[in-house]
Amino acid sequence: MGWLLRKMNILTFRSSIKLEKGEAAQLLFRRRVFRTKAGMTHGQLVRLAERWLRRLNCRIVLSEQTADFKEVPDVIGWRMDCRSTVVECKVSRSDFAVDRLKRARQKPEIAMGCQRFFLTPAGLLRADEIPPGWGLLEATKLGIQVVSPSHSQRREAGLIAEMTLLLASLRRVEVRIEPQTITEFLKWRHRMAAYNGGRLPKELVPVDEDLDSAPKFGQNSMLR
């Protein structure tokens, strides 16, 4: 450890001892590895939260997505009954302290999430430090452990914020698949064609041909 610190000081303060480029790059790499071993990164916690929400039967899980609404949850997931869970990932106490200044924390009635959790490395926070209604999760070698539960607290404004986030996410998908629309993309015939190298299986006909072969009804017959 002492050797590593001495090498870092040599590199940082540019002493008269000149290092080869390869040696300097190696020292920087070792420094990054050391920092990673000291604690989990925010990205690692986000991935853990995504997997945890899917195990809770959240069929839709979004991470670090933005919309017109001010809140940007680290991870949010929805179950089939439309109940949502928000997980905020914190890697330091200073990060947690800054989180309290967010508009959605100052006005919890406008925030997203029926259930809301903070996820941290083990031992970073105490349950009595968490805002009312929030739960605390810890990342351990065994996975995510629930330290304290969350209580249902979503209000109408929070539901609207969630809808705004979902619509913005769907729009991003539509932009990526243009000129195809979301509706066309979701139709099972188009998915079958995509899986079959761009062609429908022999048993299926394109939607346009299917419509052309459908019987024609006059106006009177439609009213019967």
Image (cartoon, rainbow, N blue to C red):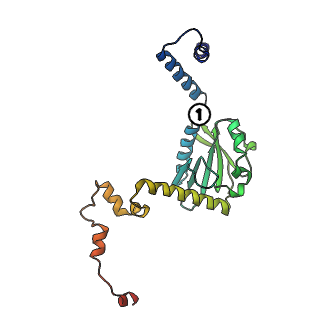
Of residues 209 and 134, which is closer to you in this image?
A: 209
> Is 136 above or below relative to 221?
above
The three-letter code of the residue at mark 1 reads Met
**Left or right, 2 with reference to 21:** right
- Outermost residue toward the left in this view: 202
How many numbered markers are drawn? Answer: 1
Of residues 174 and 74, which is closer to you in this image?
A: 174
Which quadrant is home to the C terminus? bottom left
Of residues 108 and 85, which is closer to you in this image?
A: 108
> Where does the image place residue 199, in percent across and percent down from the top left?
27, 58
> Where does the image place residue 122, in percent across and percent down from the top left?
65, 36
User: Which image quarter: residue 108?
Assistant: bottom right
Task: Return the residue at label 1.
Answer: 40
Residue at the image position 57 percent from the left and 56 percent from the top = 165
Is the residue marked by circle 1 packed among few (<14), some (14-19), or many (20+) residues within 10 Å? some
Of residues 109 and 80, which is closer to you in this image?
A: 109
**Left or right, 82 with reference to 208:** right
> Where does the image place residue 191, in percent across and percent down from the top left?
35, 58
Secondary structure beneath label 1: loop
> Where does the image place residue 97, in percent across and percent down from the top left?
72, 40
User: Which image quarter: residue 6?
Assistant: top right
Which quadrant is home to the N terminus? top right
Residue at the image position 36 percent from the left and 91 percent from the top = 220
Residue at the image position 59 percent from the left and 14 percent from the top = 14
User: Which image quarter: residue 3?
Assistant: top right
> Is 100 above or below relative to 123?
below
